């Protein structure tokens, strides 16, 4: 069952709000125009006009946490291994990523070409990468919004044109910080990403003395 903030109640779980339509029975209905459940629930026939209602119903549900966690685990592995191709493929052609680095107002990369350049620069400038998901929340199925709290650790090995470690004096520094990503999806791909982290914390870890 898909967990949802608003839905019909599962007749077996008192007080728990769920989208109580088994996914395999839903597919059976879409493909064969029939819907049946276990022996405890009567079989019934549905008309194809119900399909739009089913679609609207599912769109109000959230993607199950275990599915989202599986995608986040894959993303962590891709970052830790430097798999640029896989990361870029998870985003739309017109991807927009906004970050709090660089000039006042931050840095924005637009489109897959800039997005790829950003990740290539990142992996060339940092190694020994360790990424951890702390918490997340999503909405929609497929998810159209994701808020992600994460922790990052790595060692600077070269200057970066996108990040605060932009000169030779930062090489060898170990950085560790937390951040938040807010993603807007298009289908199962990310179309817009807004990232936040504490740049002053990074500067202090790379040898600069910065106060608030």
Image: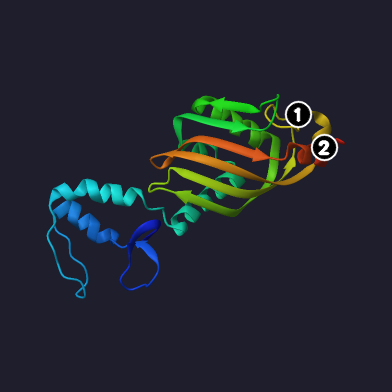
* 94 horizontally vs 126: left or right: left
In the displayed structure, does residue 116 sit left or right of residue 127?
Answer: left
Q: Residue furthest bottom?
A: 40
Q: Residue at x 69, y 42 (%)?
A: 127
Is residue 3 in view? yes
Dot 1: element: loop
Q: Is residue 77 above or below residue 85?
A: below
The quarter holding residue 3 reads bottom left
Label 1 vs label 2, nearer the camera: 2
* Residue marked by disc 1: 166
Q: Earlier in the sequence, mark 1 or mark 2?
A: 1
Quadrant assignment for the C terminus:
top right
Percent coordinates x, y for residue 181 in the rendering:
58, 42
Q: Observer-nearest residue: 91 or 22?
A: 22
Question: Residue 93 location in percent, x, y?
Answer: 44, 29
Crowding at dot 1, Cα within 10 Å, few <14 / some 14-19 / many 20+, comes out as some
Which is nearer the eye, 55 or 187?
55
Query: In the image shown, does 85 or 182 lie closer to the viewer?
Result: 182
Q: Position of residue 76 (x, y in %)?
A: 57, 49
């Amino acid at each position: 069952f898909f967990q949802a903030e608003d839905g019909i109640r599962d007749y077996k779980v008192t007080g728990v709000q769920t989208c109580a339509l088994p996914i395999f029975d839903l597919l059976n209905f879409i493909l064969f125009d029939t819907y049946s459940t276990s022996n405890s629930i009567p079989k019934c026939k549905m008309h194809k006009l119900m399909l739009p209602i089913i679609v609207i119903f599912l769109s109000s549900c959230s993607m199950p946490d275990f599915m989202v966690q599986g995608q986040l685990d894959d993303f962590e592995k891709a970052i830790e291994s430097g798999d640029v191709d896989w990361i870029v493929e998870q985003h739309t052609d017109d991807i927009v990523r906004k970050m709090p680095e660089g000039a006042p107002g931050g840095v924005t990369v637009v489109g897959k070409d800039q997005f790829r350049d950003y990740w290539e620069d990142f992996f060339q400038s940092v190694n020994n990468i360790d990424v951890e998901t702390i918490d997340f929340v999503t909405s929609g199925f497929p998810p159209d919004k994701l808020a992600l709290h994460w922790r990052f650790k790595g060692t600077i090995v070269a200057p970066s044109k996108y990040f605060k470690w932009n000169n030779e004096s930062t090489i060898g520094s170990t950085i560790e910080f937390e951040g938040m990503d807010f993603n807007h999806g298009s289908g199962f791909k990310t179309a817009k990403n807004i990232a936040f982290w504490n740049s002053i914390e990074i500067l202090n870890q790379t040898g600069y003395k910065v106060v608030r």
